[in-house]
Amino acid sequence: MHAKSSQEGTFLSETNKFVPTEALGPADCKGLAEVLMSVGDKWTILVVGALSKGQLRYNEIQRRVSGISQRMLTLTLKRLEADGIVTRTLFPSVPPRVDYELTELGMTLRGALVPLHRWAAGNRQAILQNRAKAGS
């Protein structure tokens, strides 16, 4: 047995069990970073949250996601649709009706975001206090 040096890093695990430390190859790192940038984006998280209880029309999503511009909502929905996280259903009516809803993959993302939401809600006050201290 050898003692770990401080240079070996910290390994995260929800279950506090051993987590393999194999390094990812450059292609894997790049692919993982791209996915995390996409699903970890502020607007993505809020749109997925808005759609978590079922299908919504564009304007309903915009009302639920406070502060999002029309352009940013459109870009976010297009990217989520291309990623297979959201489906877009066009109803042939006058005016045309478009509904958005999470796919099965989108529901798994929602499930992954719930613990993050709980953590953020539980730690928001501490983070705000720390920011205030750092700013003074």
Image (cartoon, rainbow, N blue to C red):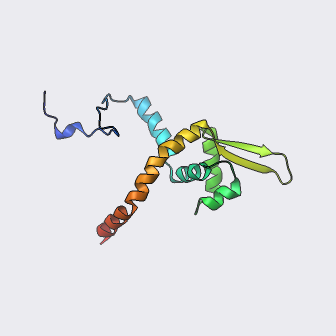
> On the rendered structure, is 40 left or right of 88?
left
Query: On screen, 42 above or below 13?
Result: below
Residue at the spot x=86%, y=53% of the render?
A: 94
Residue 87 occupies which quadrant of the picture? Answer: top right
Residue 78 occupies which quadrant of the picture? Answer: top right
Residue at the spot x=60%, y=40% of the render?
A: 85
Query: On screen, 39 above or below 125?
Result: above
Seen from this angle, which residue lies furthest bottom? 136
> On the rendered structure, is 1 left or right of 76?
left
Q: Would residue 38 be visible to someone looking at this image?
A: no
Residue at the spot x=13%, y=33% of the render?
A: 3
> On the rendered structure, is 49 left or right of 98?
left
Q: Quadrant of the C terminus?
A: bottom left
Query: On screen, 77 above or below 70?
Result: above
> On the rendered structure, is 9 left or right of 71?
left
Residue 59 percent location from the top left of the image: 70, 58
Query: On screen, 68 above or below 8?
Result: below
Residue 71 percent location from the top left of the image: 64, 56
Residue 69 percent location from the top left of the image: 62, 60
